[in-house]
Image (cartoon, helix red, strand yellow):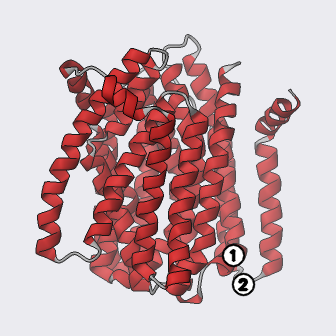
Amino acid sequence: MSKEKQLAKNTLIVALSRVSSVLAIFLVLPIYTKYLSTEEYGFFDLVTTYGALLAPIIMLRLEVAIFRWLVDVRKDMVGTSRVIANVFQIMALCIAAFTMVYLPFALLTDLQYAGLIYGYLVLFALSSTALQISRGLGRIKEFAIGGIIAGVSSLGIGAALVLVFDMRLDGVLWGLMLGYALAFLYNAWNTGLYHHVRTGNKDRLLKRDLVGFSLPMIPNGISGWATFAGTRIVVSSMLGVAVNGIYAVSSKFAVLFSSVYEIFNTTWTESASLYIKAPDRDEYFTKILNLAMVFFGSVAILFIAAMPVIFPLLVDKSFVEAYWYIPVSIIGFFFDTITRMIGAIYVALRLTKQVMYTTVAAASLSVVGTIALIPYIGLWGAVIASSLALMLMSIFRYIDIRRRGIVIKIDPGKMLILLLGFTCVSIVYYVYQPDTLIHSLTIIAAGLLSIYLNRTILRGGIGMLRG
């Protein structure tokens, strides 16, 4: 099977997982926005935001290291057990250290829902690591099913507790914790995690290499958090938790787009690591980069075109202000897809320090820009600063990776068409509101543009189905 077909096959499997999780997010969104106040939803968003910050610190980003090492030893049972055992020996120490810090902090600050938040953070980190074990071993189906369990069950349980038992915010947090617990148990069982941990030999040199690889990824994880979500902390402190609730809802739609990309990124990261030494590496990377850029750019344009129709159906009127910030956020996340594609090449080259440097710079620009702009343009300051930071990071990484000998080339003509498409749908989005007919015509036009730009991918997909 060719590299392209293997990538497409694995992407399709992961897509089934991600689509179900994304559908779950938007099925429960009307429930959460109806039964939770803006303050409660803002608090819930801050919990998940801090979770994204703390998880890479708690586990030293070892989930990235375990994936990269398992790719190289996936056919060696002894080597696999050695890698997994040593990672979990390090993780046990990490969880113990986190517990010693968290418990006094929770008691001193009288943190609300401290127990649930602790359980969510630890189980989120464990579940993420177990998922990466499945992925590193090439067990894409188990990885996909684990993702379904984590996404659907956490939201489904939370929604059920809110509707049936009127548990409100505590029900949502219980849902998160139980959902990630189920995902961890599923992946642990299917990968024989206990057996690997029990039989793997201790190896100090391997621990040193794993930690040396993953430590530079901690600032990267924190910086990525700051670029995407750290601005919410600034918004919450400068404009209030209720405004952060508005910001969180608007971001959900951009995160939905990012989730569509994550389907591809999961398999792309593996493919980049597998073929980083292939003789036709640069041609392969260039081809996939341009195909992905056009595809996800088209998806982003369709997202913006469809939002005026979809938004009122999914979000309660009390969150209507979130509508105005969605297009700029989605455009920012489009540039993030390019950034993350190049980031996968850095990981394949084991250049994690370079990943760290670029994301630190982007995060700094995002946070500083948010602080500087909010006093003048309010919440728009956070949206613009974050999106600008993502765009600039994509440009820098593209230039930097070429300097390192990876000769990838972005098609300027296709990028120009995408930028014109973004401009047109954004104008319609803001100027013709509300106008169902014009928005419907815009969706059709965006769909036709997407079909035209992605005709190569569509032909390949049809060929795979026939074959």
Neighbours of disc 2 within 10 Å: few (<14), some (14-19), many (20+): few
Residue 353 appearing in the image: no
Picture quarter with the C terminus: top right
Q: Position of residue 374 (x, y in %)?
A: 34, 76
* Callouts 1 and 2 close, C-beta under 8 Å: yes
Relative image position of residue 85 (x, y in whole percent): 31, 28
The CA span between labels 1 and 2 is: 8 Å
Q: Which residue is mark 2?
A: 434
Q: Residue furthest top?
A: 279
Instruction: Residue at 64% x, 68% y: name it.
Output: 426
The image position of residue 202, as x and y in percent, is 23, 22
| Residue at x-position 52% and y-position 68% | 157
Sequence-first tag of 1 and 2: 1
What secondary structure is found at the residue carrying circle 2?
loop
Q: Quadrant of residue 370?
A: bottom left
Q: Amino acid at mark 2?
A: Pro
Q: Is residue 457 rendered to the left or right of residue 152? A: right
- Horizontal side, residue 104 vs residue 249: left or right: left
Could one spot residue 436 in this view of the protein? yes
Between 119 and 446, the residue placed more toward the observer is 119
In this rendering, position of residue 155 left or right of residue 378: right
Which residue position holds label 1? 308
- Circle 1 sits in a helix, a strand or a loop, which is it? helix
Quarter holding residue 159: bottom right
Q: Residue at x 38, y 24 (%)?
A: 69
User: Which amino acid type corresponds to the residue marked 1 in the rendered image?
Assistant: Pro
- Residue pictured at 69% horizontal, 32% vertical: 9
Q: Is residue 94 left or right of residue 377?
A: left
Task: Tell me where residue 96 appears, x and y as whole percent.
Answer: 18, 48
